[in-house]
Image: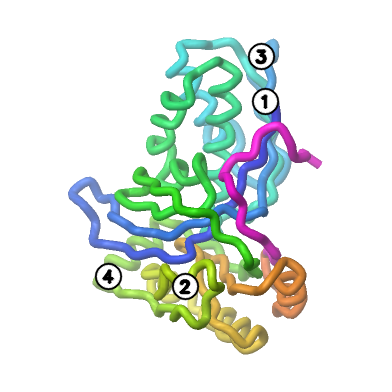
Amino acid sequence: MRAEARAKVNLALAVDPPRPDGLHPLRSLMVSVSLADGLALAGAEEDHFELRGPGPAGKDNLAWRAVEAVREEAGRDDPVHLVLAKRIPAAAGLGGGSADAAAALTLTGAHYGLASSRTAALAPRLGSDVPFCLVGGLAVVSGAGEIVEPLAPAGGFALAIVVPPVELATSAVYAAWDRLDGPEGPAIAARHLPPALRDYAPLANDLWPAARSLAPALDDWRAELAARWDRPVMLSGSGAALFAYFVDADEAASAGDEAPPGARAVEAVTPAPRGVETGGGTLA
């Protein structure tokens, strides 16, 4: 069995002060996009996790932790071979690890015959973005990430994504946001958004001031991209991925060609209707 694990982009992210358990309540407008990692899972004589690309291996990888969570829930211990081919940049605010976990939950649940409702119940334990990545599309996400309210699909636009040569740990960005007394991020007005998203305006990311305080170079990258692209540039999640809206994938790809040298990744993506796409994709 194979699956594609779609990256996510936070089109907006509002953050509140931490709860007693230390988690920050949030409200985010998230969308799945065409950038994806590939996963394959099959029965085996002994457990084997094959990682193609950068990232933690073995039990430290969220995808393998998802396999073990499903196995425990299903009461099964027969071994599997999991292959994960990475394309989504790490430490970028694009939910790569969460997307992998969601796809691994889906594949492993199907392999062991676990009901989808029981598989979905495992998602919040693995990470705050995993419940959304399991559903995907366009949705409002709230609570600590466990509440996902799907919205009508949005289309008619593409995103150019540039990941500067900066890596930000999500926990560090939230801690910086707390130290800064919970600032609000700059907003994009409806007139700068694609028609399909204007009803959700204004769109802002409250983590921008915190991310910028930890990595001042982000501000330089954002200003340079905004000047080259002649439009507002936003941060996804805790960063460091920066993005802007374009008419279609070709225009977004042309914009990516104009990005300054030195980026960790440059991608042109379109909205995807699901977070996990099973039965297709390639691991090449």
Q: Marks 3 and 1, how far apart in space?
A: 13 Å
Q: Marks 4 and 1, how far apart in space?
A: 42 Å
Q: Position of residue 213 (x, y in %)?
A: 41, 75
Residue 161: which quarter of the image? Answer: bottom right
- Label 2, residues with CA under 10 Å away: few <14, some 14-19, many ≥20: some
In the picture of the structure, the residue carrying the numbered disc 1 is 41
Observer-nearest of 142 and 81: 142
User: Residue at 54% across / 50% down in the picture?
Assistant: 137
| Colour pattern | rainbow
Q: Nearer the viewer, mark 2 or mark 3?
A: 2
In the picture of the structure, the residue carrying the numbered disc 2 is 198
Q: Secondary structure at mark 3?
A: loop
Q: Nearer the viewer, mark 2 or mark 4?
A: 2
Whichever of labels 2 and 3 marks the residue nearer the N terminus, that label is 3
Q: Marks 2 and 1, how far apart in space?
A: 40 Å
Give the amino acid type for the residue marked by disc 1 in the picture: Leu
Observer-nearest of 110 and 226: 110
Whichever of labels 4 and 3 marks the residue nearer the N terminus, that label is 3
Picture disc at residue 15 = none
In the picture of the structure, the residue carrying the numbered disc 3 is 46
In the picture of the structure, the residue carrying the numbered disc 4 is 182
Quadrant including the N terminus: top right
Q: Secondary structure at mark 2?
A: helix
Whichever of labels 4 and 1 marks the residue nearer the N terminus, that label is 1
User: Residue at 62% across / 14% down in the picture?
Assistant: 79
Magenta residues, as a range? Answer: 265-284
- Residue 274 sits inside the magenta stretch: yes
User: Residue at 22% across / 46% down in the picture?
Assistant: 21
